[in-house]
Image (cartoon, rainbow, N blue to C red):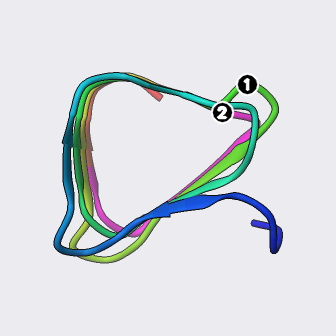
Amino acid sequence: MTNEGSFIGAQTRINGNIEADEDLLVMGRVEGDINLGNGALQLEADSSVLGDIRARAVTIRGSVVGNV
């Protein structure tokens, strides 16, 4: 992860797909696919993704139900 990018807070739940071309830090829950193109994804402890992930790099400390 770089200093540039976006984050999803621990108390936030996203229901839908996410598309971006930057890094993303997830501390909450995403129910949908994540496509970051050339960005990196970091899933923190207690985070979850229910969907497929496409990113340049993925760090998983939470849970994923889907393809990476």
Residue at 40%, 72% (x, y): give it.
44
x and y percent of residue 57 in the render? 71, 45
Which residue is the site of mark 2?
55
Q: Secondary structure at mark 1?
A: loop
Picture quadrant where residue 6 is located: bottom right
Q: Secondary structure at mark 2?
A: loop
Query: CA gap, disc 1 to disc 2?
Result: 5 Å
Is 67 in front, or is 26? 26
- Which residue type carries mark 1? Gly
Secondary structure predominantly adopted by residues drawn in magenta: strand
Quarter occupied by the N terminus: bottom right
Exactly how many numbered labels are in the figure?
Answer: 2
Question: Of marks 1 and 2, which one's residue comes earlier in the chain?
Answer: 1
Q: Is residue 57 magenta?
A: yes
Let me know if residue 20 appears in the view.
Answer: yes
x and y percent of residue 34 in the render? 45, 29
Which residue is the site of mark 1?
37
Q: Is residue 46 left or right of residue 1?
A: left
In the rendered structure, which segment of residues is drawn in magenta? 54-63
Is mark 1 in CB contact (under 8 Å) with mark 2? yes
Is 44 in front, or is 12? 12
